[in-house]
Amino acid sequence: MQLFTRQSANKPWKRITAAEPVVVGKAGLGWGYSALDLNDHEEPEKVEGDKRTPAGFFRIGASFGFAPSRRPGYI
C-alpha cells in the first residue's frame, strides 16, 4: 500500500510514501455495493460473511466522535 496526495482535483497525484506489504481481507477483495458498476463480471462481489473486504470508492467522513482525544497523537 502507498499513500498519495494532491493539492486539488485538477492536480496530479504525488506519491508520498514507499510501498508497504499489506493483507486486505482474509479472503481478498470483492466489489462493494456502491461500485458494482465497475465490476467486469469476472471479479468477485462483496457478500456479507464472505470474509472479503469491500473494494470501491468511499468517502471518509469524521471519525472517532467529537470529544477531544484523551490520547492525542495516538492515531
Image (cartoon, helix red, strand yellow):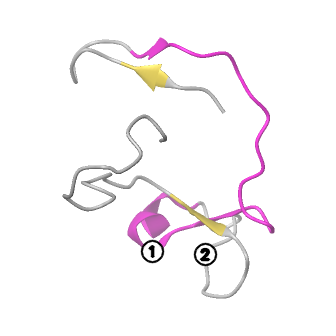
What's drawn in magenta, residue-wise?
13-39
Could you tell me if the residues under marks 1 and 2 are in contact, i.e. CB atoms within 8 Å? yes
Element at label 2: loop
Quadrant of the rendering where the N terminus is positioned: top right
Which residue is depicted at the point 22% across and 24% down? 9
Identify the residue shown where x is 62% and y is 73%. Answer: 45
Q: Position of residue 62 (x, y in %)?
A: 25, 54
| Image point (41%, 46%), residue name | 71
> In the picture provided, is 9 more to the left or to the right than 31?
left
Say what amino acid the circle numbered 1 marks: Tyr
24 shown above or below 31: above
Give how far across and how far down residue 31 sits, in percent. Answer: 57, 65
Residue 25 colored magenta?
yes
Relative height, residue 13 to residue 45 (above, below): above
**Relative height, residue 16 to residue 52 (above, below):** above
Circle 1 sits on which residue?
Answer: 33
Task: Look at mark 2 in the image and give the residue it sits on.
Answer: 46
Tell me what residue is drawn at x 23 percent, y 50 percent.
68
Q: Residue furthest bottom?
A: 49
Front residue of 71/3: it is 71
Describe residue 23's horizontal placement relative to residue 67 as left or right: right
Label 1: how many Cα within 10 Å (few below 14, some 14–19, many 20+): few
Classed neighbour count for the residue bearing mark 2: other residues with Cα under 10 Å, few (<14), some (14–19), many (≥20): some
| Residue 39 position by quadrant | bottom right
Query: How far apart are the alpha carbons under marks 1 and 2?
Result: 7 Å
Q: Is residue 40 magenta?
A: no
Amino acid type indicated by mark 2: Lys
Residue 36's x, y, as percent? 47, 68
Corner quadrant of residue 33: bottom left
Q: Mark 1 falls on what kind of element?
A: helix
Of residue 6 and residue 31, the one placed in the foreground of this image is 6
